[in-house]
Every structure is written in C-alpha cells, then in structure tokens.
Image (cartoon, grey):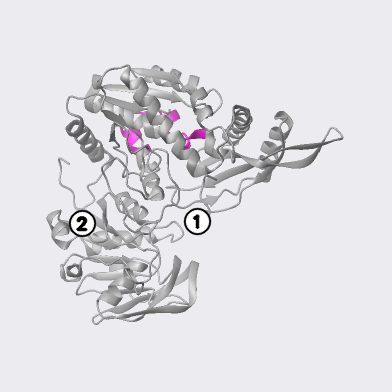
Amino acid sequence: MKKKHDLIVVLDFGAQYSMLIARRVRECNVYCELKSYDTSVEELKKIDAKGIILSGGPSSVYDEGAPRPDPKLWESGIPILGICYGTQLLAKELGGKVEKGKKHEYGKAKLEIEDQTDLFAGLPKEIQCWMSHGDHVTKLPPGFKIEAVTENCATAAVGSKEKKIFGVQFHPEVAHTPQGLDIIKNFLFVVCQVQPTWTTESFIEYSIDKVQREVGKEKVLVALSGGVDSTTVAILANKAIGDQLTCMFIDQGFMRKNEAKKITELFRKYYKINLIHVDASKKFFAKLKGITDPEEKRKIIGTEFIRTFEEEANKLGEIPFLGQGTLYPDVIESAVKTPAKGYHSKAAARIKTHHNVGGLPEDMRFKLIEPLRKLFKDEVRNLGRGLGIPEEIISRQPFPGPGLAIRIIGEVTPERVKILQEVDDIIATEIKEAGFYKKLWQSFGVLLPIRTVGVMGDKRTYLNTVALRCVTSSDAMTADWAKLPYELLEKISSRIVNEIPEVNRVVYDISSKPPSTIEWE
C-alpha cells in the first residue's frame, strides 16, 4: 500500500459475521483487516492497529478450549470493541462474570440507551438491535458501567471510558440493527479517532501495485465468466500488467441461456484483451454423471475447472498465475485453507465449499492472484465503476461459479440444464421488465428433484417442480426474501408452466439468511 491509512483490526473468534464487521468498517472509508483471534499484541502494534474489534463466535467463554486473545491485549492501550462473544470474553477476562441466560435472545430487540456518549453519541434513547446469544454478562469488571439494556439483557452494552474498552451484546454489523453503522462509526471516529481515507481510488492504486509486485514479468491467466467479479479482476490485471494477461472463458455447460455468446461478444466489444473461449461442456457433464451430493458436485467442478485451465494454458506456454474473482463471502462460508495467500479463520465452521476456494485441487500448478479476496459484492461494483466498467456488467446479479449445476438439486444432466436455462430466462425477463432486477440481490429458479401431480388440458401430468428464489441483500452475508407483487409472481409462474412442458408447478422460497443460505446448494 503506497499511502498509509489508519488500520482497524477485527480479531475473528469464529463468527460467520466477522468479515461483515470488516466490511462495515471499510464502508466508513477506514481500512480494516481480519486477523486470527490469537494475533499477538506485538504484531498488532507492529502494524499500528488504531482499534481492535472482537467478533462474535460459536463458543461459550467457559467452554474447554474456548478461543482467547493474547492476555496482553487488555493492557495494550489500543481501543477495543467487543461484539457478542467478544463482550462476554472481555467481561470475564477483566474480572466480571458470564452465565447462561434464563432466556436466549435471538432476533430483533428494543435497545434502551443509558449513556448517549462514546458508542451511542448522537443516537436516540431507543433503537432496534439484533440479538443472537444465550450467555449474559451478570457481573461487570471493575471500572465498567452499563451503557444500554434490553428487556432480556441488563448488560446489552458495557464500557470503560478510561480503558477505551466497550462491549455490545447485540450485532451492530447486521442490517437488522438499522443504526448499527452509526455505532461502528462512533467507535471509529469518537473512540479510536481514525481518519476516513480508505477509498475506491486508494484500493485501485493498492491493488495494481500488489499485482505488479506479485507477478513481476510473468504471465497471468484470468478465469473470465462475464460477471462483475471476474471482469473487475481482468480489467484490474490489465491495468497492472497489460500484455502479460490472457483471459479464458471456460464454458462448462452450466451457463445461462446463450450466455457464452453474450460474454464473448460483450467482452470483445469493450476491451482489447486477448480472450480465449473453450467449450468443455461434454467433459463436465461426464464427470458429474450420477453425482447428487452438493459438496461432491462443487469439488468435481472445481477440480475439472482447474484441470481444463492447466490443459489449455499448456497450449499457451508457461503461465504460472491464475487470476480469480474470489470474494470475502466465498472465503468465510468455505472457512478452509486455500492454495492462495490470505486470511484463514481458525475458529469458523464451514457452511459450504465454493468451487474457487475449498473446491480447488491441492496439487494445482497455478499460483492464485485474487485481488478481490477481501471485498464484498457492493465494494466490487464500486471498484468496477472506478475502473470504468460498463453498467450493464456492473449491475449484473451474482451468478455462482458452478453455474446452474448447483441450482439443479440432484443429478446434473444436459436435459435438466436445458429446462433450468429456459426457466431462468423467463425469470430474468419478467424481473427486469417489472423494474425489480436492480432492487434484488438475486432472482433465480431452482430445479427440484421431485415431480408433482398436475392437470393440463384435462389430462393428469406428473412433472418437475421449480422453486423461485428472490432475495434482497447488500452483501450476501444476510438476506431477506423479496416481497414481490403477487401479480409478478403469478406472471412468472404462468409463463413457466405454460412455456416449459417439463414443469407443472412453481413454488416461492420465503426463507431468509440466516437460517437459510441464498443458494440451495
């Protein structure tokens, strides 16, 4: 990084929201890094951390082997904010007491603020917050006082002005705490007194410099899918290394209707970058024959993806680096070590394997270049705009690397892919025409492995069922099902069952994340 920015560090105790905390900090234009919970105070001072945020986590502070930070942290003089488990941890470590609550608190709660300074400066006396915990702080450490309460939690926020150590039992980083960002801003600008200098422009400068240093004079192959992530990586790499870059689009057969043609035409229209199109669909279908387990699907696709790249790259001469559009949510939900450099949580539980993270073969010969690895989707879109990428690419909804293969529950066959391509095309067309495409995070169909009875033309049918999934989100870490007009849902359903002869039933998924995920596999 050429320009020095104030740094906030999130110590990760295994929370699925740890990277979301980091994202919220960067949303305030403050640079933030995620580090393992046991990072030493020596290291934190070496990198000049201006503030520390302790994440939540699945453990209880009294569990055997519960994760704990460097004991010197509490006397380091660095301002600290504990969230959920982080609050219970600081309370116990500093002489307080934590116990199992009589009532678990999960979901929305009314927070009554008792001290409207520091964390709660400028906020009203009552705000909504999001709770997710079973343990409570029942005795405060010496020098701490209660800052806020809820009906079921008398220590919803605690703090010591003298030590500059604060803790909140709720989650200010999630959208369900509407004024949570204000609380985070107060920690950054009131407590830590950092400066908001981390911007899109500074990240572009930093990333170009980093790619140049990592690659040197070597060549890079970028896996292009046509989405905003891989396109942004390609343009960023092009700015950094120019003719050293080759882009390759591998068509595995699981793309949307006419997607391969659209991608190659669009990319060649806007950019003067060497693009190679490879149709490997027959190979991928053969590898997935008879496979129904979603984890196995992802790993097979990930392995075949890399093997195809290696095979095609061999035709181009020596290319040691592979560029990918891996994002923060991919990394945290996989929660595994990868062949790439970067953060790995010691305490997180795996949700699923992403094809470009945990699904990659360990023996692949490429070294990975992943400049977006610490960004969320909205940050990537802002970065893409800063790089001058056309809005028609920037505003595309996220599409999974394994494509429609993970939206087909059960075995993936050419026939089932063809059905879902037609379904997906109808959904996209109607969502766009109704003006909802940019308002939704994702909208897509899922082909279920069940058939149901129906009646068509006075005849009994026994055909496929499709689930319609539409969600709103800002970062994919949390999401709500979209409350679309009934008329729109009716039109989508009517078109699908009337125009696609293999389908006779459409259902609407009304699950939020959590507890569900956005994709079904």
| Secondary element at image label 2 | loop
Question: What range of the chain is rendered magenta?
Answer: 381-403
User: Which residue appears at 31% of the width and 56% of the height?
Assistant: 346
Q: Residues within 10 Å of mark 1 (few under 14, many from 20)?
A: few
Residue 444: give x, y in percent of width and height: 57, 38
Label 1 or label 2, whichever comes before in sequence order = 2
Determine the CA span between mark 1 and mark 2.
Answer: 32 Å
Question: Which mark is nearer the camera, 1 or 2?
Answer: 1
Quarter holding the N terminus? top left
Q: Is residue 310 above or below residue 296?
A: above
Front residue of this view, candidates 385 and 327: 327
Residue 467: give x, y in percent of width and height: 63, 43
Residue 31, numbered label: none
Front residue of this view, candidates 361 and 372: 361
User: Which residue appears at 45% of the width and 23% of the height?
Assistant: 263
Residue 344: give x, y in percent of width and height: 30, 50
Q: Is residue 187 left or right of residue 360?
A: left
Q: Is residue 463 visible?
A: yes
Give amino acid for label 2. Val
Q: Residues within 10 Å of mark 2 (few under 14, many from 20)?
A: some
Q: Which residue is mark 1?
A: 514
Q: Which residue is mark 2?
A: 194
Q: Across the whole image, how many numbered discs are drawn on residues?
A: 2
